[in-house]
Amino acid sequence: MSQPGLVEIEYSRVQQANNTVLGLLLTGASLFLALGPARELDETQAQVVGYVGAIAPALLTVRALSRLATAGPVLTLTGAGICDLRIAPKTIRWSAIRGITAIQGGKALLLDVDPAVEAGLTLTPDTRWFRRLAFAHGMRGLCIALLGLKSGHHELLGMILAHAEAAWSTRSAERR
């Protein structure tokens, strides 16, 4: 089986621009609730709900803006491994990946990575936060989101699995 070539995927600028606009709208609506006339809530309740409700959309807007400013690939596939800068700045060798599970209808992947290799990765703050949340729900592994990138999630899923299977079959053939 031939080894698939280099694949580099960037953020979708359209998706990130849409996320920015949506975040600004949601932040504005929350601030309006905090600062504007309260109808069904008393003024203090409206301010608390509005200010607290503005935090998440504001943070997501900042993230979308930073992704709009990001140039170059975020996800890279090679014959040697996979590198997702949203997880860690280092390539994870296919030989260190023990399994791949599609979750959320193929919109994300869970990579079962050798614990020794995983311990050597410098995980991003987002990844560390998500892992705590995922562990609480019984999910183990590193999660790669396939949405928000220039390729469709079904296409990306196919490319990632093709690269992994090619590497695993090559490794299996070399052992014989």
Image: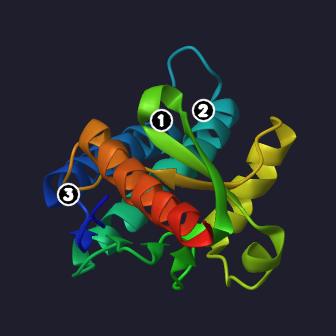
Q: Residue at x 22, y 50 (%)?
A: 15
Image quarter (top left, top right, bottom left or bottom right) of the N terminus = bottom left
In the rendering, at what x and y percent does residue 51 appear? 58, 48
- 2 and 1 marks in contact (CB < 8 Å): yes
Q: How is the image coloured?
A: rainbow
Q: Label 1 crowding class (10 Å Cα cut-off): few <14, some 14-19, many 20+?
A: many
Q: Residue at x 74, y 74 (%)?
A: 118
The residue tagged 1 is 33
The residue tagged 3 is 12
Q: Amino acid at mark 1?
A: Leu
Q: Is residue 95 left or right of residue 33?
A: right
Q: Is residue 122 left or right of residue 174?
A: right
Dot 1 or dot 3: first in sequence order is 3
Label 3, label 2: how far apart the Cα atoms are = 36 Å
Label 1, label 3: how far apart the Cα atoms are = 32 Å
Disc number placed over residue 53 in the picture, else none? none
Looking at the picture, does residue 62 appear above or below residue 72?
Answer: above
Dot 2 or dot 1: first in sequence order is 1
Disc number placed over residue 46 in the picture, else none? 2
Q: Nearer the viewer, residue 115 or 19?
A: 115
Q: Nearer the viewer, residue 23 or 5?
A: 5
Image quadrant in which you'd find residue 158 = top left
